[in-house]
Image (cartoon, rainbow, N blue to C red):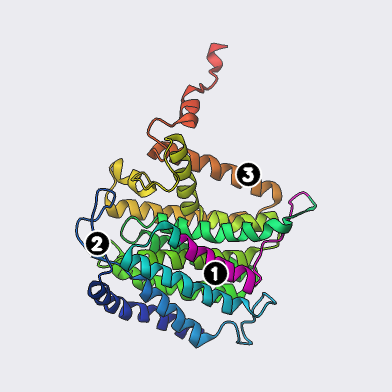
Amino acid sequence: MFYLTLAICFFSSIILTPLVKKLAFKIGATDKPNQRKVHQKIMPRLGGLAIYISFLIGVAIIRPDATSLLPIMNPNENIHLAIILGSIIIILTGVLDDTKEISPKVKLFGQILASFIVVFMGDLKVEFINLPFGGQLNFGFLSIPITMFWIIGITNAINLIDGLDGLAAGVSTIALFAISGMAFLMGNPYVMILALIAAVSSLGFLIFNFHPAKIFMGDTGALFLGYLISVLSLLGFKNVTFISLVIPIIILGVPISDTFFAIIRRLVNKQPLSAPDKSHLHHCLLRIGFSHKQAVLIIYAMSLVFGLVAFIFSQSTVWGSLIVILTLLVAIEIIVEKVGLVREDYQPLLKFMKGFKPINLKDR
């Protein structure tokens, strides 16, 4: 029944996407080209609605919150309802933005409301972590703002990378498969099931969204996938060791890194944090000569590498994990400097490496 449900979700997304495309044109949910965007013609958005409906179909069929074969690992029975209610708020926010282009403040309010429902109704909070060398770090009253910040941050991170055909859908699908795999290893079937249902629904949509795209997912899709990924990653890895808490951060390495360096870039260039620009990772790859499709495939590959690193990290010793993290951070910094993610002349590590000359024994 489980595999049949996944197949139903996949094909539901394929069937629903053309219908949503027609609806988008009918209600004016279209994306017009401008100097900041890559596409050259008016495109229908709202495609995330097909992903969401397919997701709800899967949830309704398999009932991951109720089945005795897949017991929910979180003892709070309200978490499932909270996730669904929060997703409704997110979808309504996305639909409004795709049709009316609401202000960033209104969009943020919708995200805050959705995260509030999950935190308070679902009682989903990161309250503490066990430190790698002993002891425990309790967040106390900060657990609520930290949890809400994570949900809102990841939701926006997925939205920010939605700049090329198939990019956000592909990266989200890879992240969801990685989360489901880690949830399986950690014995959390509830998270595994929800992540897989969302992943196959997104995969069905990707058939129409990969370059050249016939429809965009819009904020409806980007916000929903970001919201669900953020909540599932918390639900699967909260209140455990420091190492386990780092796992979802690694899995989401691409959108998190892109968002982090976008903030750095705006601070360095003395621009408002909310100011849009054309210097995200995908823009930089296009600028240095990669084609649209190549840029997307490169970022897919990066996402797959992050997922693999997360698995290696989870199986490593404490010292091994620290080595993995250090290596990953150096690799990220080199990529950032190579593609000019902060700015083209920002290359401190590369300049340091060029200035380092190996010792020549003959000179001694």
Q: Residues within 10 Å of mark 2 (few under 14, many from 20)?
A: few
Say left or right for 51 vs 23.
Answer: right
Label placed on residue 323: 3
What amino acid is found at the position of numbered circle 2 in the picture? Pro
Q: Which residue is mark 2?
A: 212
Q: Residue at x 62, y 68 (%)?
A: 119
Give the alpha-carbon distance from disc 3 to disc 2, as whole Å: 40 Å
Disc 2 or 1, which lies upstream in sequence? Answer: 1
Give yes or no for residue 131 being in the magenta stretch.
Answer: yes
Q: Quadrant of residue 201?
A: bottom left
Residue 320 image offset from top left, x and y in percent: 66, 48
Q: Residue at x 49, y 39 (%)?
A: 333
- Figure quadrant of the C terminus: top right
Describe the element under mark 3 as helix, strand or loop. helix
Give the alpha-carbon distance from disc 3 to disc 1, as whole Å: 25 Å
Say left or right for 357 vs 206.
Answer: right
From the viewer's perspective, is the residue at label 3 or at label 2 nearer?
2
Residue 260 image offset from top left, x and y in percent: 49, 46
What amino acid is found at the position of numbered circle 1 in the picture? Ser
| Image: magenta residue range | 108-133
Disc 3 or 1, which lies upstream in sequence? Answer: 1
Disc 3 or 2, which lies upstream in sequence? Answer: 2
